[in-house]
Image (tube, rainbow, N blue to C red):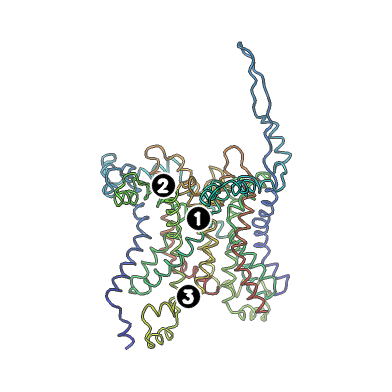
C-alpha cells in the first residue's frame, strides 16, 4: 500500500491519538514544571466601636487575574519532583541518616505519600498478577473436565466479575464485607470477635484489595487458558499417557509448557491493568490505608479549593516512567522479533 | 485402553466438581445477593440482628407491607434523577462505539495491509498508549480544557474516550484484518476498484464478526469508565458510574445507601443482558489477542 493511501486511511485515528494521548503527555510534562500561584493576601481594617481589627484575606480578584495571565502557575523547574510529596530526596536522606534499624526506615518511608502509593501499587501489581494466573489456570483445567452441558452457564457466571465495572464490583463486595453485611458478619462469627472489621486495619484492607483484584481478573486468565486448552494437541497427550505419565505429570510436562505463551500474554495485560489500580480504592473507601499512584493523581486533581495541577502532573510523569520500565522487556522482545523477521 | 486409563478416580471428580461449585459461588453470589437485597430496606440488607433478615426481609414487610419494595429504585431513579445519568451513559456509549469503530476499521485495515516499517512503530506506540493509566492523561487534559472552555460537555468526553480506546481498537481490528486474505481486496483492485472502493465493496461485507467483537469491548470501556467521566463531566452531565460515586458521599443518611445499591444493580443488569447475548463473541475477543501473541 503506498504511503499516501496508508495515510488517507489512518489519519483520523492517528489524529485522535496524537491530540488526546501524545499531546496530553507533553502537557503533563510542561505542567509538572510549575506550581500553583502563591496566594495574594490583602489586609483590610475593620473598625468597630471596640477598636480596629486587621483582617487578612485572599484577594480573589487579583488571584483570578494572575491565573488568567499564567494559567499553569509559577515556574519551579524540577522542584515539584523533589518535594516532600513526591520523590522527597531530602526526607529520604534524613531518614537513612537518623534511623536506627530497618523497621524504622520502612515505617518512616511509608509515611511519605508518594512512596506509600508506589509500594502499594507495586505490591498490588506483583501479588495479584501471579495469583490471577494460577487461579485462572486452575479454573480452566477444572472447567475443561466438566460435562459439556454445564460449560456454558459456568462461563457465563465466570465472566461477571471481570466485565462488571470495577467501581460497581468493588462496591458490591464492600457492602458484603461491611460488619453488618453477610461476609463481615460471617467472619465475625467465625473468629468469634464481634469487633473484627476488615476496614479497620491497613493490613486487612490491603488483603481485601488483593482479594478483590484476584476476583476481578481471574476470569480473564480463565477464559484465555480455557481457549488455549481446547487447542492442546491430543497426540502429545496420548503419547505421554502411553509413556506412563500420571495425570499430574501430563499437566506439568505437556499442558503447562504448551500454555506458557498464553501465560506471558496474560501477565503482560495484567501488569498493565494492575499498575493503574484505582477504582477499588474508591469503591472500598480504602484511601486511608492504601493509596495507589493513580489515586494520588486523582486526589490532587480533586483538591477542594483549586486542583493541584503541578503536583498531579509530576506524579503522572513518574507513573508513565513506571509504565515504560514495566513494558521495557516486552518492547525489547518485540523489537528483536521484528529485526529477525526483516 | 486409553479410554479406560483416562477414566477419572471418583475422588478427583468430586474434588473438581467441588472446585467449580465454589468458584461459581465466589463469582456469582455477590451479584445475586446484591440484586436480591436491593429490594429490601437498609435495616434488612445491613442487618445488625441476623443475616437471614436480608433474605426474608421482616423490617421491609413492617415498613412497606410486603417483603419486597422498590423504594430504593424510586429514590435513585426519580428523587436523585438517576435516569438522567442513564440517558447520558446511553449517548456516550453509543457515540463512542460508533466513532471508534469507524476510525478503527479504517486504521486497522491500513495497518494490516501496509508492509512498511512504520506500521511496527505505530503498533508499538499503540501498545505503550494502551498501558497509560487513564488518570495521567486526564491530568493533562484538565488545564487545556478549562482554557478552551470545552470542559464538562458530553462531546468532549466522547472524543477523549474514543481516543483512549483507539490503541486497543487498532490492535484488535489489525489482527482481525490480517486474517482476511489479501487476495480479496487485490482481486477487487485488479477489477478496477480504487483502494477505498475495494475496502468498501470487498472488505466491509466480510468484516462484521471482527467489528462486533471489537465493538463489544469499546462498549465495555465506555460503559465502565470512571476516571475520565468523573473528571471531565459536570454534575448535570454525569454518566452512571460517577453518579453512583456521588451517591456514596450522601449515604450517611438513613436509607440513602439503598439508593446506591439500587443504582449499582441498575448498572449491572445491562451487562448481564450483554453477556447473555454475546458470550461467544466476548470469549473469542478475549482470546483474539492471545492467539497471535
- Mark 2 or 3, which is nearer the eye? 2
**Pointers 3 and 1 in contact (CB under 8 A)?**
no
Among the 4 quarters of the image, the one containing residue B16: bottom left
Determine which residue is flagged by label 1: B223
Q: Give how far across and how far down residue A151 sits, in percent.
A: 36, 70
Residue B209 shows in the view:
no
Q: Residues within 10 Å of mark 3 (few under 14, many from 20)?
A: some
Share a chain, discs 1 and 2? Answer: no
Residue B49 shows in the view:
yes
Q: Residue at x 47, y 55 (%)?
A: A165
User: Which of the marked residues, 2 or 3, is nearer the chain's N terminus?
Assistant: 2
| Residue B156, above or below B124 | above
- Rounded to the nearest whole Å, what is the CA distance between mark 2 and mark 3? 38 Å
Q: Nearer the viewer, residue A155 or A270?
A: A270
Which dot marks residue B170? none
| Residue A50, above or below A119 | above
Chain designation of label 1: B
- Assign a secondary structure to mark 2: loop
- Rounded to the nearest whole Å, what is the CA distance between mark 1 and mark 2? 29 Å
Q: Nearer the viewer, residue B188 or B11?
A: B11
Determine which residue is flagged by label 2: A199
Q: Give how far across and how far down residue A173 sits, in percent.
A: 40, 52
Determine which residue is flagged by label 3: A259
Chain designation of label 3: A
- Assign a secondary structure to mark 1: helix
Q: In the rendered view, does A246 fall on the left or right side of B174?
A: left
Q: Give how far across and how far down residue B290 sits, in percent.
A: 52, 71
Chain designation of label 2: A
Is the C terminus of chain B in the top left, top right, bottom left or bottom right quadrant?
Answer: bottom right
Q: Residues within 10 Å of mark 1 (few under 14, many from 20)?
A: many
Residue closest to the far front: A100
Amino acid at each position: 500500500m503506498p504511503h499516501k493511501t496508508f495515510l488517507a486511511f489512518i489519519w483520523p485515528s492517528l489524529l485522535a491519538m496524537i491530540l488526546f494521548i501524545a499531546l496530553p503527555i507533553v502537557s503533563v510534562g510542561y505542567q509538572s514544571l510549575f506550581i500553583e500561584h502563591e496566594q495574594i493576601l490583602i489586609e483590610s481594617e475593620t473598625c468597630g466601636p471596640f477598636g480596629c481589627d486587621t483582617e487578612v484575606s485572599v484577594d480573589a480578584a487579583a488571584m483570578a487575574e494572575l491565573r488568567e495571565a499564567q494559567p499553569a502557575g509559577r515556574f519551579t523547574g524540577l522542584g515539584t519532583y523533589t518535594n516532600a510529596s513526591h520523590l522527597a530526596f531530602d526526607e529520604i536522606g534524613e531518614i537513612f541518616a537518623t534511623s536506627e534499624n530497618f523497621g524504622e526506615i520502612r515505617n518512616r518511608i511509608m509515611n511519605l505519600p508518594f512512596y506509600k502509593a508506589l509500594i502499594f501499587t507495586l505490591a498490588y501489581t506483583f501479588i495479584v498478577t501471579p495469583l490471577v494466573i494460577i487461579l485462572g489456570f486452575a479454573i480452566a483445567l477444572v472447567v475443561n473436565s466438566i460435562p459439556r452441558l454445564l460449560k456454558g452457564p459456568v462461563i457465563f457466571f465466570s465472566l461477571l466479575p471481570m466485565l462488571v465495572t470495577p467501581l460497581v464490583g468493588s462496591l458490591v463486595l464492600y457492602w458484603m464485607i461491611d460488619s453488618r453485611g453477610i461476609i463481615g458478619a460471617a467472619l465475625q462469627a467465625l473468629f468469634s470477635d464481634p469487633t473484627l472489621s476488615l476496614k479497620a486495619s491497613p493490613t486487612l484492607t490491603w488483603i481485601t484489595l488483593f482479594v478483590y483484584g484476584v476476583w476481578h481478573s481471574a476470569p480473564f486468565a480463565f477464559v484465555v487458558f480455557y481457549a488455549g486448552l481446547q487447542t492442546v494437541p491430543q497426540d502429545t497427550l496420548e503419547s505421554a499417557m502411553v509413556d506412563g505419565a500420571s495425570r499430574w505429570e501430563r499437566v506439568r510436562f505437556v499442558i503447562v509448557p504448551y500454555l506458557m505463551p498464553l501465560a506471558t500474554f496474560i501477565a503482560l495485560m495484567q501488569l498493565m491493568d494492575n499498575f493503574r489500580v484505582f477504582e477499588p480504592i474508591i469503591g472500598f473507601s480504602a484511601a486511608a490505608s492504601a493509596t495507589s499512584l493513580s489515586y494520588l493523581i486523582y486526589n490532587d486533581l480533586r483538591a477542594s479549593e483549586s486542583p493541584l495541577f503541578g503536583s498531579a502532573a509530576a506524579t503522572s510523569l513518574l507513573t508513565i516512567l513506571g509504565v515504560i520500565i514495566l513494558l521495557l522487556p516486552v518492547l525489547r522482545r518485540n523489537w528483536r522479533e521484528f529485526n529477525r523477521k526483516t | 485402553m486409553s479410554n479406560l486409563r483416562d477414566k477419572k478416580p471418583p475422588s478427583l471428580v468430586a474434588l473438581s466438581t467441588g472446585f467449580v461449585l465454589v468458584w461459581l459461588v465466589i463469582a456469582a453470589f455477590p451479584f445475586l445477593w446484591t440484586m436480591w437485597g436491593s429490594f429490601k430496606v437498609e435495616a434488612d440488607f445491613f442487618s445488625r440482628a441476623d443475616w437471614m433478615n436480608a433474605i426474608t426481609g421482616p423490617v421491609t414487610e413492617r415498613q412497606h407491607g410486603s417483603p419486597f419494595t422498590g423504594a430504593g429504585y424510586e429514590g435513585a431513579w426519580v428523587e436523585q434523577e438517576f435516569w438522567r445519568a442513564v440517558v447520558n451513559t446511553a449517548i456516550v456509549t453509543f457515540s463512542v462505539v460508533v466513532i471508534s469503530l469507524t476510525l478503527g476499521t479504517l486504521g486497522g485495515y491500513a495497518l494490516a495491509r501496509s508492509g512498511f516499517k512504520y506500521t511496527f512503530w505505530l503498533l508499538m506506540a499503540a501498545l505503550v498508549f494502551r498501558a497509560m493509566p487513564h488518570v495521567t492523561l486526564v491530568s493533562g487534559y484538565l488545564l487545556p480544557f478549562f482554557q478552551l472552555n470545552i470542559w464538562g460537555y458530553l462531546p468532549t468526553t466522547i472524543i477523549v474516550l474514543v481516543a483512549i480506546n483507539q490503541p486497543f481498537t487498532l490492535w484488535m481490528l489489525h489482527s482481525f484484518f490480517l486474517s482476511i486474505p489479501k487476495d480479496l481486496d487485490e482481486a477487487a483492485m485488479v477489477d478496477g476498484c480504487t483502494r477505498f472502493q475495494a475496502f468498501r465493496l470487498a472488505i466491509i461485507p466480510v468484516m462484521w464478526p471482527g467489528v462486533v467483537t471489537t465493538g463489544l469491548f469499546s462498549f465495555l470501556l465506555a460503559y465502565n469508565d470512571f476516571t475520565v467521566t468523573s473528571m471531565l463531566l459536570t454534575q448535570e452531565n454525569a454518566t452512571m458510574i460517577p453518579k453512583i460515586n456521588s451517591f456514596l458521599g450522601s449515604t450517611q443518611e438513613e436509607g440513602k445507601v439503598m439508593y446506591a445499591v439500587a443504582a449499582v444493580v441498575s448498572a449491572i443488569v445491562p451487562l448481564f443482558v450483554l453477556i447473555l447475548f454475546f458470550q461467544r463473541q466476548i470469549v473469542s475477543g478475549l482470546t483474539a489477542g492471545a492467539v497471535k501473541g
